[in-house]
Amino acid sequence: MGWNVNGEAPVSDPMTRLLLDRAEISQVMHRYCMAVDTRDWDLLASCFTDDLEADFRSFGAKEPVTGRTAWIDAVRGTVGGLDATQHLTANHMHRIDGDEAQLTAYLQAVHWLQNDVGDAEYTIGGRYDCDLCRTEEGWRIRRYRLSVTWQRGNRHILRLGQRRQRAVAG
């Protein structure tokens, strides 16, 4: 049995272990959303393994990104220049096998940037499919894929935000 995230002794009751694992796995997704929306890049790093693979091709990425640092840089470059984002997940479905797990979670993500070009909002809906593993620090996302199933609003604000972020960083 694995250690819980507080470093406490393993839980031997299978149902208790399952419930704790489910809560801890969902907490990773909640932490992820909070980190992106508050631009807390250290908190975001705590959600992933070093060898992370992130597949956001349905959102416009050309290919999956490999590596936690590279992914955090990509996220910062995408949302860092926006005025606000709000990521909400629900309907978490867990499949847990020892120290490996899969999480599927529905997503709505609002992106907001006041601009002179058009609407300030771009919203997507879809699903995250995550592979997680238990580490000494707790559950971490090893691989995840975003499947965008709908969108509305002004997608152009993402480019405007990227330009703003580059200008600030550069």
Image (spheres, grey):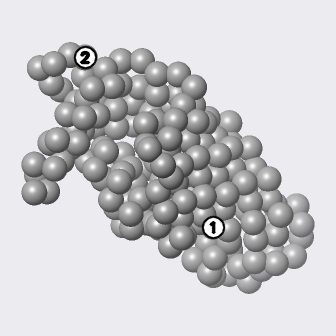
* Residue 130 in the figure: left or right of residue 80: right
- Examine the image and state in which quarter residue 122 appears: top left
Residue depth check, mark 1 versus mark 2: number of the one nearer the observer: 2
- Residue visible at 42% across and 18% down? 152
Viewer-proximal residue among 90 and 80: 80
Picture coordinates of residue 119 (x, y %)? 25, 17
Q: How many marks?
A: 2
Q: Amino acid at mark 2?
A: Asp
Which residue is under mark 1?
A: 139
Q: Give the label on residue 119, or none.
A: 2
* Residue 28 in the figure: left or right of residue 85: right
- Residue visible at 61% across and 72% down? 138
Viewer-proximal residue among 20 and 133: 133
Q: Amino acid at mark 1?
A: Trp
Picture coordinates of residue 82 (x, y %)? 24, 38
Picture coordinates of residue 169 (x, y %)? 14, 56
Figure quadrant of the N terminus: bottom right
- Examine the image and state in which quarter residue 139 appears: bottom right
Q: Which is more N-terminal, label 2 or label 1?
A: 2
Q: Is residue 37 above or below residue 170?
A: above
Inspect this view and state whether residue 57 appears.
yes
- Residue visible at 16% across and 50% down? 166
- Residue visible at 28% across and 50% down? 77
* Residue 129 in the figure: left or right of residue 159: right
State the CA–CA distance, disc 1 to disc 2.
38 Å
Q: Is residue 2 above or below residue 113?
A: below
